[in-house]
Amino acid sequence: MLNLTELRKDYNKETIDVDTFNANPMYQFNTWFQQAIDVEIEEPNAMVLSTVNSLGKPSSRVVLLKHTEAEGFIFFTNYLSRKGQDIEKNTSVSLLFFWKELERQVRIEGHVEKKSPELASEYFKSRPYKSQIAAVISPQSQEIPNRAFLDQKMSELENQTEPITCPEHWGGYIIKPEYMEFWQGRANRLHDRIAYIKNSDLSWRITRLAP
């Protein structure tokens, strides 16, 4: 077994405070995200999406953020995948962004809604050709006999002349946040945590949490 007690790091890059944060957490997120881009973090849009199925069993995976808008965070996936099936039964989810180079993380809790087929089709057309094929041929989260099963299907579609169209089982979701937390690593594990909590009138309350 592993003993990891000596693996530790102290944090000392930045400090954050409620007084310097935007009143709207989506604007604050966009500010932090741009800073992650500016320091050239690889795939800053990678986020851990956690879902819970109808039996209360959680599962997590990394997906890619593709858009933000005033209402929330947009990603695209196969609706028949495990995450898609979980969301069908339980729309409550969480997201986690971790940017270790900035010693920061952002945690989001909210609910999910499907985006329009038109948006899915528009984004699908922008994807690389082979990524389009992959979305069509992969029975995501289902058991398959071997890798050759996928390679054969890829070869079959690669040789066709007709354009690839967005399948009905593939599309976008928006995660509409109800809670957002911004974490900044600090020395001696006394980290900064600034939380936004959505009120019943849809305004946001901002507060500091103990680390």
Image (tube, helix red, strand yellow):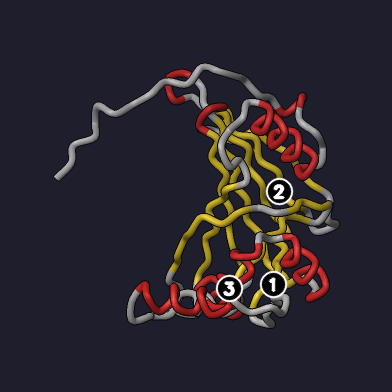
Q: Residue 18: percent from the left, percent from the top?
A: 72, 29
Describe residue 70's horizontal placement relative to residue 208 as left or right. right
Q: Tags 3 and 2 in contact by the CB under 8 Å rule?
A: no
Q: Which residue is mark 3?
A: 158
State the separation of the CA atoms marked 2 and 1: 29 Å
Which quadrant of the figure has residue 42?
A: top right
State the separation of the CA atoms marked 3 and 2: 48 Å
Q: Secondary structure at mark 1?
A: strand
| 70 to 79, vertically: above or below | above
Which quarter of the rendered picture does the N terminus lie within?
Answer: top left
| 127 to 164, vertically: above or below | above
Q: Nearer the viewer, mark 3 or mark 1?
A: 3
Nearest the eye: 205 or 66:
66
Q: Nearer the viewer, mark 3 or mark 2?
A: 3
Q: Residue 103: percent from the left, percent from the top?
A: 53, 28
User: What's the residue type where badge 3 is placed?
Assistant: Glu
Q: Secondary structure at mark 3?
A: helix
Q: Residue 33: percent from the left, percent from the top?
A: 69, 37
Q: Which mark is residue 85?
A: none
Q: Which mark is residue 197?
A: 2
